[in-house]
Amino acid sequence: MIVKKILANDGIDNLGKILLEEAGFFVETQKAPEGHLAETINAGNFDVLLVRSATKVTSSIIDACPSLKLIGRAGVGLDNIDVKYAESKGIKVVNTPASSSQSVAELVFAHLFSGVRFLQESNYLMRSQGDTHFGELKKKFGAGTELKGKTIGIIGFGRIGQAVARMAIGLGMDVVASDPFITEAIIPLHILPTGQDIPVPIRTCSLDEVFQKSDFISLHVPGKVNGNAVIGQQEISKMKKGVGLVNASRGGVIDEDALISGLDSGHVAFAGLDVFENEPTPRTELLRHVGISVSPHIGAATQEAQERIGREMAENIIQFFANK
Ligand code: NAD
């Protein structure tokens, strides 16, 4: 049997690597030197190229690498791969869409909990002044709010949006959601002592209703719409004063200028951002803003999600070659 060769250019979780090796694949995890991806693939005669978000798989890479049969994206978004072109050349492209939903949803709540108790600023000030100005800081950060009883608006009610809804219901929040393609979703609430799922149906509504009703809004759309942000100045003006906004979907889905002016005017109380327009060099006004809780695009970066991604990717690859 000829051994199939996989270049995991952005790495692969150890479990995924073990599953592939046990199935007889050769897995290379040494990243190709910058600008030498095609050469590396051709020198090693790789059948599969696995990437996360860092490696760009352009039409010229695809043209230059006739040995490729499969391109795998360990994660959700396929915007770093020219999928149409790959498929037109008979190369299959697979991703692992469901594996990271829980991790992203939990990060959304990390930003929300942070925002309502001012943790993004208090962490910073406690470090430098906590031993000298404890009383002042206690007063400064002493008027937080609870999430329970508040309404969360979810824009984009797919896998991650629904995972956010499940956690919100568990916290005693009301959920309103908007999605042009989904009219209703059944959210399964898993009750541990009985092991049962209680189905909670949620019907989606218009974006305007989300803006009017929500105390917090979290975005879970695939990206910009025709190059435009989903949330700009006009949309922010329709939201409640004091709204908290979270974006862990794609950079630029909230217009960054509109967000900064919304925060500065006080219309937006706080924001949580995991994604930025200019990754990997986001605007410093966003990074340093006291009203923004920031993280470096780590929504899917938990050990559990990476293990699920590794397993799902290994199963995809094994299945693909089994059917050949
Ligand atoms: P999904 O495809 O399951 O859901 C996206 C939903 O958005 C779909 O139901 C779609 O109908 C809806 N939608 C499309 N355009 C819309 C619009 N203009 N307004 C409202 N809804 C709209 O995708 P998912 O798995 O839930 O992922 C959502 C986003 O999260 C993607 O952008 C993905 O790249 C991102 N993501 C980020 C991280 C991270 O590390 N922060 C990790 C995984 C995924």
Image (cartoon, rainbow, N blue to C red):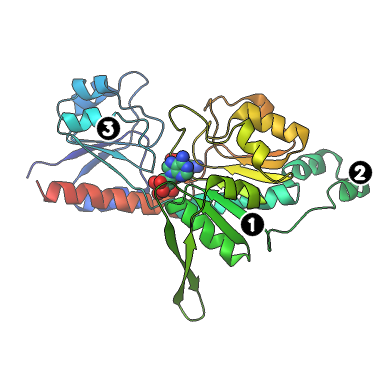
Q: Residue at x 62, y 51 (%)?
A: 110
Q: Label 3's element? A: helix
Q: Is residue 62 left or right of residue 114?
A: left
What quarter of the picture does the N terminus occupy?
top left
Q: Which residue is mark 2?
A: 133
The residue that disc 3 covers is 83
Q: Quadrant of ligand 1?
A: top left
- The answer to whether residue 66 of the structure is visible from this angle is yes
Q: Nearer the viewer, residue 282 or 238?
A: 238
Q: Amino acid at mark 1?
A: Thr
Amino acid at pointer 3: Val
Expressed as whole percent of the image width and height from the top left, the position of residue 239 reads 66, 43
Toward which corner of the image does residue 199 lie, by quadrant? bottom left
- Label 2's element? loop
Residue in the picture at 37% in, 47% down: 13
* Residue 171 coordinates in the image, percent (x, y): 62, 64
Residue 40 lies in quadrant = top left
Residue at disc 1, secondary structure: strand
Residue 28 percent coordinates (x, y):
28, 37
Which kind of residue does numbered mark 2 sit on?
Answer: His
Q: Which residue is mark 1?
A: 151
Dot 2, crowdedness within 10 Å: few (<14), some or many (≥20)? Answer: few
Earlier along the polypeptide chain: callout 2 or callout 3? 3
Which of discs 3 and 1 lies nearer the camera? The answer is 1
Residue 16, percent across and down?
31, 50
**How many labels, in total?**
3
